[in-house]
Image (spheres, coloured by chain):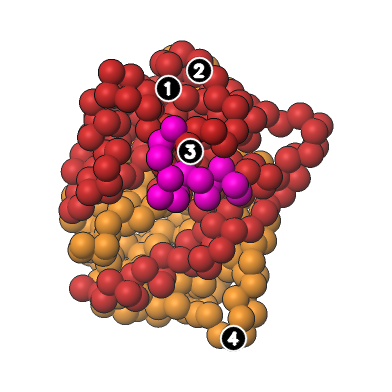
Chain colours: A red, B orange
Amino acid sequence: MVDITDFRNGMSLLSGAVNVITTAGASGRFGFTASAVCSVTDTPPTLLVCMNRSSSSHCHFKDNEILTVNVLGAQQQDVSQAFSSKISMDERFNFGEWITLATGSPVLKDALVSFDCQVKQMNEVGTHTIFYCEVQAIQTNTEGEHSGLIYFNRSYHHVGKLSA
Amino acid sequence: MVDITDFRNGMSLLSGAVNVITTAGASGRFGFTASAVCSVTDTPPTLLVCMNRSSSSHCHFKDNEILTVNVLGAQQQDVSQAFSSKISMDERFNFGEWITLATGSPVLKDALVSFDCQVKQMNEVGTHTIFYCEVQAIQTNTEGEHSGLIYFNRSYHHVGKLSA
């Protein structure tokens, strides 16, 4: 087994897209910044999100059973910072414009791409829950020049350019 | 439910690190290129890898119960292409220099970082298996100037610079 600090240092070199994961419903409206998202299968279209069970919003995602993965563009570092800060949920949602698609979970209107999902299965591993989510609707914003927001080596970076 | 093409197009905008996942053991030596890797928890240090069950090497990863996630640096696009091509497993391992750490699974000597893992749990979702892997050893190469290899919008990109 490896040391936790070595593991964290190693993981800081695994670059990842920056996403804001949101939910809304009877249990309230919540959102946080995360990079632990990945594609699972396209039959049916499914992704997974890894969430710490000790986070205050974890139980609300579990109760609402819906979530949206909003993949941030290079110009949305302020949204990433708001959703990883100590400010209240209401204050967080003051950053960006929010709409809904199929499930009612908050969708960031100008995210690079948003996946609006129904949670289908949860799997607990150590301190975390893996949410397996079936995609109900997708919104993409690829008009104009956009690039992706990346977290690598403990800082933000930009990647690529999408042509109009 | 969304269309598979829309899902794939949307997922092409979720940037990801480029990794070569390897295994070795009684079942043989195998490796393939994948971006569907993410950190799960640090207690104990665990990551997940998502693998298509229809791939020819899937059963060998399952049998060997060990795997290494080799996170590629910007200069290793040739290794990525070899491990996602139609060439034989032996030919693939001619790209790069391979060593072993704790488990005996192949470790790319100059990968940005390699996580040498024991598979602890498998979860089948649709067409894919999620391998939950406990990290047994880590190798990092951060001397000199290195940057990460990213796949975004269906092409390779480089991100960041690590200072010596």
Label 3 vs label 4: CA separation? 37 Å
Q: Are marks 1 and 4 on the same chain?
A: no
Residue where numbered disc 4 is placed: B164
Label 1 vs label 4: CA separation? 44 Å
Other residues around mark 4 within 10 Å, as few (<14) / some (14–19) / many (≥20)? few
Residue B158 in the magenta stretch? The answer is no
Q: What is the three-letter code of the residue carrying label 1?
A: Ser
Residue where numbered disc 1 is placed: A105
Q: Residue at x 59, y 86 (%)?
A: B164
Query: Label 1's element?
Result: loop
Q: What is the three-letter code of the residue carrying label 2?
A: Thr
Other residues around mark 3 within 10 Å, as few (<14) / some (14–19) / many (≥20)? many
Q: What is the three-letter code of the residue carrying label 4?
A: Ala
- Image mark count: 4
Q: Are marks 2 and 1 on the same chain?
A: yes
Q: Residue at x 27, y 46 (%)?
A: A55
Residue where numbered disc 2 is placed: A100
Q: What is the three-letter code of the residue carrying label 3?
A: Arg
Q: Chain of mark 1?
A: A
Q: Chain of mark 3?
A: A
Residue where numbered disc 3 is placed: A92
* Marks 2 and 1 in Cβ contact (< 8 Å): yes
Q: Residue at x 20, y 52 (%)?
A: A127
Q: Nearer the viewer, mark 1 or mark 4?
A: 1
Query: Label 4's element?
Result: loop
Q: Nearer the viewer, mark 3 or mark 4?
A: 3
- In-front residue for pair B78/A44: A44
